[in-house]
Amino acid sequence: MQHARNKAQGFTLVEIAIVLVIIGLLLGGVLKGQEMIENSRIKAVVNDMNGVSAAYNAYFDRYRALPGDEAAATMTARGWAGTLGGDGNGVLAIAPADAFLNTGEQASMWRALRASGLATGDPTLPAAPASLPRAGNGGLLAVALGTYGMAGPSVCVSGLTHKQAAGVDVAVDGALPANNIGNNAGSVRGANNAVAPLAPAAAVAGGAAYNENAATLWTLCRRM
């Protein structure tokens, strides 16, 4: 009586090496793709901040007034939709602590920029945090005066990871110093905390090193 024999044949070292190489290439591709996505978000945030600054200054050049400071009647007389307005005193009154609340002249500013076509969005949106535009990282975009010791108006972004914050800092102010702290000097300043969105402060932040393993989120502001 004959018995069938099943011969188990294993992989050769060459075949195993090929499989490991393929796995390594796949993992490398995934990591590279993630890096590209993150770099794209960083560039988008920088472009968003530049865009707000450009819109703000273009509005002043066009209307000889600060967006958000003009009275509601002035904007309505131009045929613009919406009802929000400022007090017309020539000063944009947005305290750092109120940046992401989107009340008062902050909300009026977005009505003015949107209605004038200098920013995208619905000018009739109410004065509420949900009406603020979103940056490329998914955080909120806002404007405030005197953030982190910087004179004049600044554009701020919330919800940045340490990696994103470091990327924005480097893109605007150049390479970080040896201590990896660049957020308490230059044109970009900020702070990090578990709170999101973290409202910017008026005082200069003490400075903190960027740590990609940390779970806290950053708010960065840039002078306009």
Image (cartoon, rainbow, N blue to C red):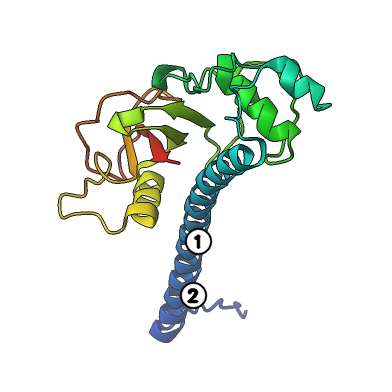
Q: Is residue 33 above or below residue 149?
A: below
The number of numbered discs placed on residues in the rendered structure image is 2
Label of residue 36 in the image? 1
Label of residue 135 in the image? none
* Picture coordinates of residue 211, whole percent (x, y): 27, 44
Question: What's the residue type where badge 1 is placed?
Answer: Met
Local packing at callout 1 (Cα closer than 10 Å; few below 14, some 14-19, many 20+) is few
Left or right placement of residue 147 versus residue 64 in this view: left
Residue 81 visible in the shown view: no
* Residue named by callout 2: 22
In what element is the residue under mark 1? helix
In what element is the residue under mark 2? helix
* Picture coordinates of residue 48, whole percent (x, y): 55, 45
Taking the spot 71% from the left edge, 16% from the top edge, the residue there is 72
Front residue (pair 1, 35): 35
Taking the spot 35% from the left edge, 34% from the top edge, the residue there is 215
In primary-sequence order, the first of circles 2 and 1 is 2
Taking the spot 31% from the left edge, 58% from the top edge, the residue there is 174
Q: Looking at the rendering, in which quadrant would you find the N terminus? A: bottom right
* Picture coordinates of residue 104, whole percent (x, y): 57, 14
Give the residue at the far left of this rendering. Answer: 178
Question: What's the residue type where badge 2 is placed?
Answer: Ile
